Image: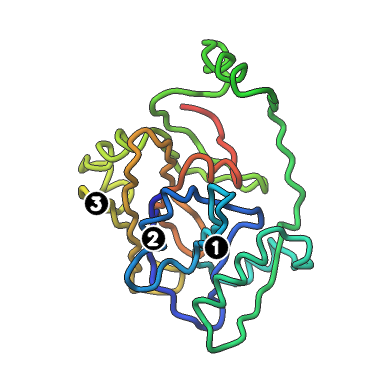
Amino acid sequence: GHVETQIKFKPKKGRALVTFGHLQHIPKELASKFVRRADGGCPFIHDENTADSKVYRLSQTWTMNLNERFYNTYAEIDESTVDACGTFRESMSKLFSSAEVPIRCYKMKQAQVNPELVFVGPRDLMEAFLFDADTQKYFSMGRGAYQMLQDEAAQVNPELVFVGPRDLMEAFLFDADTQKYFSMAANQHGFKTWSIPKGKWFPRAKSFLWGSVMDDQVVLFTREGNSSMTVMVSKEQFLREKQFGEKL
């Protein structure tokens, strides 16, 4: 129910707006502050008048460079096989109503295999299961840990990954050594990071805003690509795309 980051998108060749392929939703009570804005609301939240539903459709959107690395990693697929394509197309129509916006869908070329155990069960039994000390040790659960990152495409990121609740992460980022390590600056509203794209000399900045839920689990890590930049995402979102490496 909060904005993780804001960035100004400049349409040009090699730049794109992207979203997840799976359907996303946001509870109506959390979406109200965005859909009732004086500027016409948020184009990424679709507030249809559906009285029988407690959620609105959502397209969590960010920018991406469509470079050689992207096309080497992803292959184009039929949009009819992607659940969230229709929702994303509606968002693009709200943003670029005066022009036809090409929508393409991609998936990673390399199959992703998760070697870890998967546990399935009702919510009440799962809660009891997670109170077990051995379970918590197996899943590296607790209030704050830092770990190595390895994504699901067998690409290893050697940088440290920090995991913990939003309130402790905010305090952690006020430390001067932490800000120096991540090339960032933090205040009570959020933090700003800088990066220099390969082949460029002028740094780029990106701002992240704190959410209002203090016990939300978030992940702070350095994203490698065309440039290195510190980013923060929810733990839930992080685990959809990546997996943790060895705990330190």
List the residue tagged with mark 2: 34
- Structural distance between the alpha carbons of marks 1 and 2: 14 Å
Separation of residues labelled 3 and 2 (CA atoms): 18 Å
Of labels 1 and 2, earlier in sequence is 2
The nearer-to-camera label among 1 and 3 is 1
Question: Please, what secondary structure does the residue beneath circle 2 have?
Answer: helix
Q: Earlier in the sequence, mark 3 or mark 2?
A: 2
Viewer-side residue, 140 vs 3: 3
* Residue 48, numbered label: 1
10 Å crowding of disc 1: few (<14), some (14-19), many (20+)? few
Report crowding for label 2: few under 14, some 14 to 19, many 20 or more residues within 10 A (C-alpha): some
Label 3's element? Answer: loop
Query: What amino acid is labelled 1 in the image?
Result: Glu
Q: Residue at x 50, y 64 (%)?
A: 44
The residue indicated by pointer 3 is: 189
Q: Which residue of the protein is positioned furthest toward the top in this rendering?
A: 133
The alpha-carbon separation of the residues under discs 1 and 3 comes to 31 Å
Q: Residue at x 68, y 23 (%)?
A: 121
